[in-house]
């Protein structure tokens, strides 16, 4: 020991016996800390207040439009009507898009976790691709689908809209699947491997069922995101009969709720604005309910997987 | 193409002599999924470059900075849109970065788990509100408020700075577009930075607290420095979101032409112009719109690579909830 | 159980405690006489009927004991017996754990640590802590030590303060040429001594050590133990350890905690508290005897 004990022996710190109230510069430091904590708390409250303000605006403006007829009748120009055809059109396109994006997304998730392995170069590359896909603005997705489908067909169609929505959903579902698959307990795989079960049987029989809840959560959130997209539809599915139900996306333009909101709002009439808000209320309600439901489901899955 | 080759070799490793037919089918299917994702990106680049072809061969790179947009005289340039996009996104970033990090700190460091479990999803739900609804909220609530209170106040107090010029009565302006984008970027930065702050090891924050540090000192001394790279990536991802937004910005930016230093004047931006002009394109406009999309795509691809690069050891990417 | 603990604490023999340095080095010079003239009877902590709950489960049973100035007090016992909970209650490190609740009183030099007027930050500024796993900040060696003094506004003579702290932690000679390099490049033992240097740089009154050597190799452990012998002349030390030999080597007094399995819950309980030599050579509780002779835990 380089240091002699006597060098260490010293008086107790000046503060030793005094009450445990702030000493030295602590009063000022506490004030600074509390002030900044208050700022952070206020920022969080501000964000929640923003959400509430948006929701209240939509509710107060949209509630007068809501009626049974509003949900069950098709649009009827300036004279009122409802959003039944737009609602059905959105459902058709979203379901169609999800039917493509969910299986492909799950396959990408499986590729990242089961085939390539989390640390491999290939997985890294694919993650870069997913990052890029998610970063592409939805209006660019629209213009790409315009060039890919609308131009060759010489026609705006619900099919083109559904493809655009599936491109938007794909990276979301792939990422969500990857995250859930990555936390399936390795013991599940090892147990199956130890029994000499083929990997694909393990994946279908054990891993996917274990991750199903989480993947479904991701899929619902992705669908909710896609259902509210306007920009790509503006480019590839904006020409449709506004007052008719159209459930056949191939070769036909299909109406949608976001496009209904966007176009009705521009109509030169007060009732048009109310209809647009009514549609916004329906859309927002659906999206927020899907969000809450998906989150509740996720926490249930987490508990079941013991996370 | 090397990626396809390595997929092949990887599959041979995995699906080697021991693998059954079923396993090989599964690996091939999964690889197909990955290839589809990669093909979509490749197709995007091809479509946008192909569609912009006529405009590229006519105007070349000069298009990017040329600021006139006149379909009747076939004069197109991306300069004005680029200006509007960059300025509105900059406003959003300047506001949303400190706010978002503050919210992240509140949720990740300060709030109890119970509060976090409620407030966190509420903040994320802000990101789930469709842009068309955010845009209407911007027109109905935000723009009048900005026109009557914020812009006159800023003009009065800071009018000597050219960017705070004379306001319009509508409130539809580059500034309002920036505020609207703030709302859309805020939950991204908040949620991603919260997730980062939650990864700071307990030992480090405890160690700092045991040295008689206040909460703010723990944050400034330990939490922020250890996550700085990830937070920077989160901010860049937020920027990516702001740069690409079309509908909400279209609704509140006012559709002005020309470049002005005054933020309180109507303006235009890349993504909203694509969305709007596509409703009724004139003559040679479509290739020019593809050119705008190309500019946006290049910016966004660069951003996703940059975000990944600066994130370093952190895995920061937007998720299905942001 | 509280009465039992209190009784034992009351039996303290100050002269024995002051002189009981099992492996302590002979202290040279005039200082020795001063030590002798001033037996370490002064009480730093009076722990009165303290119980700790996490939600509905109780982690620590009713505990009463006194901790004396300029002594090393060791807390031993099998894992899960509430040792760390007890230690972390002494500088309010448990406060941030959800549903933490403390009953009873912890008096530090006569002041209630858990009184409403007590400032938690001030508590930790005076009662420092070193953790089980070395936790240097991802900063330079210098900045690790200088960080807390800077916060506290001790900017004058900062270089000297850093050097002094590193010397007192017996680390100076090893790091003086690379103060600007990252602390994460140090070995585990060096990191832990850096954490000690970091803690003493702000001149606390008490140093709590939570199994400070459990993650270290024997040589690093020996250097930490040696350090404790010198540090106790200036600070009051409380060390949690699961290593009985370590307690016997470094501590003046030892508290033995064990799980009380009599109730429905497994509650950590103080079994015996005595001068270290007494506890190890002549324990009064059969459970202590069983533990130190290796029959359980």
Image (cartoon, rainbow, N blue to C red):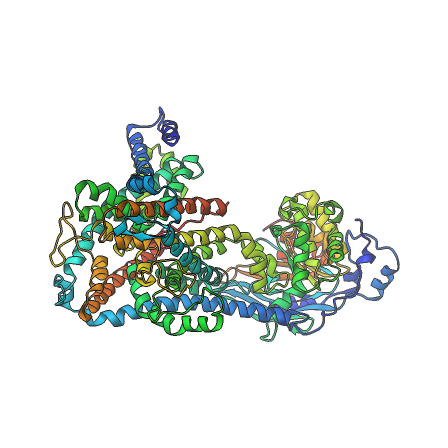
Left or right of B125 in this view: A235: left
Q: Residue furthest right?
A: C30
**Does residue B4 show up?**
yes
Q: Residue furthest front?
A: B73
If the image is split into quadrants, where does the N terminus of chain C sit?
bottom right
Q: Position of residue A19 (x, y in %)?
A: 67, 74
When asked about the image quadrant of residue A167, the answer is top left
Left or right of B171 in this view: B312: right
Q: Position of residue C18 (x, y in %)?
A: 78, 61
Q: Residue at x 60, y 75 (%)?
A: C117
Q: Position of residue A195 (x, y in %)?
A: 35, 34
When asked about the image quadrant of residue B147, the answer is bottom left
Q: Residue furthest top?
A: B17
Q: Residue at x 32, y 63 (%)?
A: B254
When asked about the image quadrant of residue C92, the answer is bottom right
In the image, B224 versus A165, the foreground residue is A165
Q: Position of residue C239 (x, y in %)?
A: 66, 57
In the image, B224 versus C164, the foreground residue is B224
Q: Residue furthest bottom?
A: C117
**Does residue C80 show up?**
no
In the image, B252 versus C23, the foreground residue is B252
Q: Residue at x 57, y 56 (%)?
A: B222
Q: How many numbered callouts?
A: 0
Left or right of A82 in this view: A43: right
């Amino acid at each position: 020991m380089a240091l002699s004990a006597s060098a260490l022996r010293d008086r107790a710190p000046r503060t030793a016996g005094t009450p445990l109230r702030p000493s030295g510069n602590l009063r000022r430091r506490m004030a600074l800390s509390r002030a900044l904590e208050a700022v952070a708390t206020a920022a969080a409250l501000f964000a929640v207040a923003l959400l509430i303000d948006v929701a209240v605006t939509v509710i107060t403006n949209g509630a007068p439009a809501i009626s049974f007829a509003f949900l069950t009748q098709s649009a009827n120009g300036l004279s009122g009507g409802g959003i039944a055809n737009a609602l059905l059109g959105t459902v058709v396109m979203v379901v169609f898009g999800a039917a493509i994006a969910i299986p492909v997304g799950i396959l990408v998730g499986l590729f990242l976790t089961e085939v390539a392995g989390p640390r491999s170069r290939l997985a890294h590359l694919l993650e870069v691709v997913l990052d890029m896909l998610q970063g592409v603005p939805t209006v660019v997705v629209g213009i790409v689908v315009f060039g890919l489908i609308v131009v060759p067909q010489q026609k705006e169609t619900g099919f083109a809209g559904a493809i655009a929505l599936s491109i938007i959903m794909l990276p979301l579902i792939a990422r969500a699947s990857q995250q859930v698959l990555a936390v399936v307990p390795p013991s599940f795989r090892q147990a199956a491997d130890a029994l000499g079960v083929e990997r694909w049987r393990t994946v279908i029989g054990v891993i996917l069922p274990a991750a199903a809840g989480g993947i479904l959560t991701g899929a619902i959130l992705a669908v909710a995101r896609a259902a509210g997209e306007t920009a790509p539809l503006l480019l590839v599915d904006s020409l449709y009969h506004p007052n008719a139900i159209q459930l056949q996306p191939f070769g036909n333009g299909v109406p949608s709720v976001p496009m209904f909101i966007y176009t009705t709002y521009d109509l030169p009439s007060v009732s048009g604005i109310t209809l647009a808000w009514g549609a916004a209320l329906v859309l927002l309600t659906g999206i927020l309910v899907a969000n809450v439901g998906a989150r509740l489901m996720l926490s249930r899955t987490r508990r079941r997987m013991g996370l | 193409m090397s990626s396809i080759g390595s997929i092949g070799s990887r599959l041979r490793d995995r699906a080697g002599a021991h693998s059954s037919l079923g396993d090989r089918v599964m690996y091939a299917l999964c690889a197909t999924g990955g290839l589809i994702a990669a093909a979509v990106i490749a197709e995007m680049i091809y479509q946008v470059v192909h569609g912009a072809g006529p405009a590229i061969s006519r105007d070349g790179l000069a298009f990017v900075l040329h600021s006139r947009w006149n379909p009747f005289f076939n004069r197109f340039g991306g300069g004005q849109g680029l200006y509007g996009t960059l300025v509105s996104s900059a406003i959003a970033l300047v506001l949303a970065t400190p706010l978002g990090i503050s919210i992240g700190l509140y949720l990740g460091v300060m709030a109890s788990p119970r509060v976090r479990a409620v407030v966190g999803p509420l903040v994320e739900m802000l990101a789930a509100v469709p842009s068309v609804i955010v845009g209407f909220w911007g027109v109905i609530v935000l723009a009048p408020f900005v026109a009557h209170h914020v812009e006159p106040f800023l003009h009065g107090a800071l009018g000597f700075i050219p960017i705070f010029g004379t306001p319009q009565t509508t409130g539809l302006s580059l500034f309002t577009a920036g505020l609207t984008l703030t709302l859309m970027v805020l939950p991204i930065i908040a949620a991603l930075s919260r997730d980062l702050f939650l990864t700071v090891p307990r030992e480090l924050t405890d160690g700092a607290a045991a040295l008689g540090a206040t909460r703010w000192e723990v944050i400034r001394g330990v939490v922020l420095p250890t996550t700085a790279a990830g937070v920077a990536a989160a901010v860049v991802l937020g920027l990516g979101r702001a740069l690409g937004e079309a509908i909400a910005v279209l609704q509140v930016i006012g559709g002005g032409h020309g470049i002005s230093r005054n933020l309180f004047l109507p303006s235009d931006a890349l993504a909203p112009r694509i969305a709007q002009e596509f409703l009724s394109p004139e003559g040679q406009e479509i290739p020019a719109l593809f050119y705008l999309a190309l500019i946006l795509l290049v910016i966004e691809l660069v951003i996703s690579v940059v975000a990944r690069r600066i994130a370093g050891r952190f895995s920061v990417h937007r998720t299905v909830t942001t | 159980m509280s009465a039992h603990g209190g009784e034992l604490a009351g039996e303290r023999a100050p002269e024995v405690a002051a002189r009981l340095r099992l492996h302590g080095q002979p202290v040279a010079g005039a200082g020795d006489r001063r030590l002798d003239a001033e037996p370490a009877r002064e009480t730093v902590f009076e722990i009165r009927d303290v119980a700790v709950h996490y939600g509905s489960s109780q982690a620590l049973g009713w505990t009463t004991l006194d901790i004396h100035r300029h002594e090393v007090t060791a807390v031993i016992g099998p894992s899960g017996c509430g040792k760390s909970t007890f230690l972390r209650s002494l500088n309010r490190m448990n406060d941030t754990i959800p549903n933490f609740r403390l009953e009873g009183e912890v008096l530090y030099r006569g002041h209630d640590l858990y009184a409403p007027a007590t400032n938690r930050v001030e508590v930790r500024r005076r009662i420092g802590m070193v953790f089980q796993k070395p936790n240097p900040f991802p900063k330079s060696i210098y900045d690790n030590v200088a960080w807390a003094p800077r916060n506290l506004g001790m900017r004058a003579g900062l270089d000297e303060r850093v050097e002094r702290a590193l010397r007192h932690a017996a680390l100076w000679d090893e790091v003086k040429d690379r103060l600007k390099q990252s602390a994460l490049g140090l070995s585990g033992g060096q990191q832990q001594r850096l954490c000690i240097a970091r803690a003493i740089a702000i001149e606390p009154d008490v140093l709590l050590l939570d199994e400070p050597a459990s993650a270290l190799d024997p040589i690093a452990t020996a250097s930490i133990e040696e350090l404790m012998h010198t540090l106790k002349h200036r600070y009051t030390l409380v060390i949690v350890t699961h290593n009985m030999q370590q307690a016997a080597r470094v501590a003046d007094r030892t508290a033995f905690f064990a799980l009380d399995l009599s109730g429905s819950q497994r509650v950590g309980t103080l079994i015996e508290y005595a001068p270290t030599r007494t506890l190890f050579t002549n324990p009064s509780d059969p459970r202590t005897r069983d533990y130190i002779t290796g029959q359980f835990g």
